[in-house]
Image (cartoon, rainbow, N blue to C red):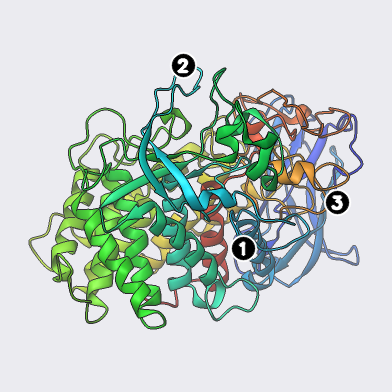
């Protein structure tokens, strides 16, 4: 695998070909890119089969523009090549270059392994006693979370250090759940988003993510996520807990981000004495709006309601008692949503870890999933609302509020805006209800808004030599890329057309190798992928540093405007020689650095990875085969 030799620098080359490293679907559009500093007069390219024989030849495509030190980026289109096999691209004439090998095959053959890799990532992110033993995970961590003290949200200074922690007097079981990222914090903010997409995948793609798959059945993993969320919501007292752990305590006490270690070290770290008391006994933060029965920030309320409503949809037949409790929690949470929030939303402590500002989308999603839950059978007793139309009306109202609000189409599917999924769900719900009149939106309304978001991404792509629908010099590039693929597939599914098929193929290729750096942004998917993630387990367990074994399936931040720096005691230098092999390919304000210190480019996270499993499932299945 490329990169294991730890080169001191990338070899000086004036012409390079970037391809989709996971592979092109046989019947889908196909595009690679030639990056070159040379004039292209008289240059053509050929697609060669595994025997070296050309199966397709054509002149270079349109010059897409300049990238960094490369004066030209040319599109190489070869849609007609559809026979399954291993191929390379050769450029000849005034320019000479050869691509890495790549595959053409069915979506199932190409993405079955990446989808299984994604499940493996979440299994390795498990906290608590129910961890899964792997080459990366050898022991349980944070068992003390099972009897965790609850604290009021502290004040955070400008450096994100927390002040004094004041206990509420409550003690809860906060064990389990997934670590948020390369650290060991756990947030309802990111957890609820991940579960919403994962549970929907289990429901809609049973042959890819559900019981129909022998290699990537996410059902148990979705329940693992739901179990933790049920601990963070006390339905008896109507109390929300939103975070486990504190990142940094400044000088008063040590926080999670202040040390570098394996998770199993925390339960007895430095004998649990000051200043390490909150490493051993991690604080749980309570809803900042108050305790029992307090209003809930609408972003979290909407997503939690969606999670638990989907829980009911999935488990009502196999685990009725569990499903019924999920649905009861969903309705209680939705009723407590603060629908006129002032100031910052509740996300994480400190807020700037996840500075979400849009919330109408979350309530749209929560109401839609509650509609699906109620219309799917006889609801359990004791629910505040039993009429599905109550929630369909609410979903339409919140969709209208989003579309007419300040954040309409300002983003695409990711942690900070879920309308790229919520609109798809609401469109289906409206159809299931027979397109009732008198609601705040229609199917045409939500479809047009989904198209508006996609068209903005298409326009963005015209400014980028690689056609990417999201700016490279921005956080969460990988997550947005996969989210755009999901949205494009959704729109074409709802319309029965192929308006965004080419874009879906290009955006998927962008995050899996067809980019300036020639690297996949998901570990294990492709020939070149992140080796030096800012992830404590992968940094401390393997030899050589960061693999093998690999944390397969982990999606990293991706290219950004900055590459962060900063080491901690015990952090293993990776790459060992400090070389930045991707530096020659930085350009147009964007950088990518595969270095353990650079959380801004190579830290993985549960929310960043959440759009990947849906994207892979869409490409494999072509359309949902399950129903809400």
* Image position, residue 175 (x, y; %): 51, 54
Residue drawn at 13 percent across, 54 percent down: 440
Q: Give the mark, 1 or 3, whose residue is nearer the N terminus.
A: 3
Front position in the image: 223 or 76: 223
Front position in the image: 109 or 33: 109
Residue drawn at 15 percent across, 71 percent down: 386
Q: CA distance from mark 2 to mark 1?
A: 37 Å
Which callout, 2 or 1, points to the residue nearer the camera?
Answer: 2
Name the residue beneath numbered marker 1.
Answer: 119
Kindly identify which numbered label has been placed on residue 1.
3
Number of residues whose C-alpha sits closer than 10 Å to that of mark 3, classed few (under 14), some (14–19) or many (20 or more): few
Q: Is residue 390 left or right of residue 218?
A: left
Q: CA distance from mark 3 to mark 2?
A: 42 Å
Is residue 251 positioned above or below 118 on the image? above
Kindly identify which numbered label has been placed on residue 70.
none
Which corner quadrant holds the C terminus?
Answer: bottom left
The answer to whether marks 2 and 1 mark residues whose Cβ atoms lie closer than 8 Å is: no
Is residue 515 visible in this depiction of the protein?
yes
Name the residue beneath numbered marker 2.
Answer: 158
Q: Is residue 284 left or right of residue 72?
A: left
Front position in the image: 376 or 249: 249
Is residue 556 positioned above or below 223 on the image? above
Which callout, 1 or 3, points to the residue nearer the camera?
Answer: 1
The answer to whether marks 3 and 2 mark residues whose Cβ atoms lie closer than 8 Å is: no
Q: Determine the secondary structure under disc 3.
A: loop
Is residue 499 visible in this depiction of the protein?
no
Q: Determine the secondary structure under disc 1.
A: helix
* Image position, residue 537 (x, y; %): 72, 46
Q: Give the mark, 2 or 1, whose residue is nearer the N terminus.
A: 1
Q: Give the mark, 3 or 2, whose residue is nearer the N terminus.
A: 3
């Amino acid at each position: 695998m490329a990169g294991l030799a730890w080169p001191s620098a990338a070899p000086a080359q004036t012409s390079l070909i970037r391809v989709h490293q996971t592979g092109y679907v046989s019947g889908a559009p196909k595009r690679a890119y030639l990056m070159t500093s040379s004039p292209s007069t008289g240059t053509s390219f050929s697609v060669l089969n595994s025997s070296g024989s050309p199966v397709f030849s054509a002149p270079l495509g349109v010059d897409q523009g300049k990238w960094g030190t490369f004066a030209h980026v040319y599109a190489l289109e070869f849609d007609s090549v559809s026979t399954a096999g291993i191929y390379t691209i050769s450029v000849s004439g005034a320019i000479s270059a050869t691509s890495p090998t790549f595959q053409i095959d069915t979506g199932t053959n190409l993405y079955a392994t990446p989808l299984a890799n994604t499940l493996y990532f979440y299994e390795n992110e498990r906290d608590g006693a129910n961890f899964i033993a792997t080459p990366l995970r050898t022991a349980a961590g944070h068992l003390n979370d099972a009897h965790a003290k609850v604290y009021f949200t502290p004040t955070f200074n400008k450096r994100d250090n927390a002040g004094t922690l004041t206990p509420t007097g409550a003690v809860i079981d906060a064990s389990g759940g997934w670590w948020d990222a390369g650290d060991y914090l756990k947030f309802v903010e990111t957890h609820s988003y991940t579960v919403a997409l994962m549970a929907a995948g289990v429901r809609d793609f049973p042959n890819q993510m559900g019981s129909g798959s022998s290699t990537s059945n996410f059902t148990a993993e979705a329940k693992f996520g739901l179990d933790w969320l049920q601990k963070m919501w006390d339905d008896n007292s109507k109390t929300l807990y939103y975070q486990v752990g504190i990142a940094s305590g400044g000088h008063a006490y040590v926080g999670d981000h202040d040390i570098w270690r394996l998770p199993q070290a925390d339960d007895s770290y430095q004998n649990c004495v000051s200043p390490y008391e909150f490493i051993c006994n991690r604080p749980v933060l309570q809803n900042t709006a108050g305790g029992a029965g307090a209003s809930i920030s609408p972003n979290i309320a909407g997503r939690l309601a969606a999670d638990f409503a989907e829980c009911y949809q999935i488990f009502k037949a196999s685990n009725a008692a569990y499903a019924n409790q999920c649905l009861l929690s969903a309705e209680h949470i939705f009723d407590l949503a603060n629908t006129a929030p002032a100031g910052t939303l509740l996300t994480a402590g400190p807020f700037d870890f996840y500075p979400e500002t849009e919330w109408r989308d979350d309530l749209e999603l929560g109401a839609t999933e509650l509609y699906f839950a109620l219309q799917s059978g006889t609801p359990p007793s004791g629910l505040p609302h039993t009429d599905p139309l109550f929630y369909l009306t609410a979903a339409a109202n919140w969709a209208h509020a989003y579309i007419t609000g300040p954040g309409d189409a300002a983003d695409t599917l990711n942690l900070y805006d879920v309308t790229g999924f919520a609109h798809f769900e609401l469109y289906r719900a409206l159809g299931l209800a027979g397109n009732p009149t008198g609601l705040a939106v229609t199917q045409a309304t939500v479809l047009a808004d989904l198209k508006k978001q996609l068209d903005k991404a298409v326009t963005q792509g015209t400014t980028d030599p690689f056609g990417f629908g999201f700016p490279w010099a921005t956080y969460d590039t990988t997550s947005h890329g996969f989210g755009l693929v999901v949205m494009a597939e959704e729109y074409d599914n709802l319309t029965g057309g192929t308006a965004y098929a080419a874009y879906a193929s290009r955006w998927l290729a962008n995050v899996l190798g067809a980019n300036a750096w020639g690297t996949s942004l998901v570990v294990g998917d492709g020939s070149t992928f992140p080796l030096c993630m800012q992830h404590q387990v992968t940094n401390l367990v393997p030899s050589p540093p960061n693999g093998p074994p690999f944390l397969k399936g982990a999606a990293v931040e991706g290219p950004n405007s900055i590459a962060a720096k900063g080491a901690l005691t015990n952090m293993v230098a990776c790459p060992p020689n400090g070389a930045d092999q991707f530096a020659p390919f930085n350009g147009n304000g964007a950088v990518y650095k595969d270095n353990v210190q650079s959380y801004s480019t190579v830290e993985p996270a549960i929310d960043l990875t959440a759009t990947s499993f849906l994207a892979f499932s869409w490409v494999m299945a072509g359309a949902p085969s399950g129903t809400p």
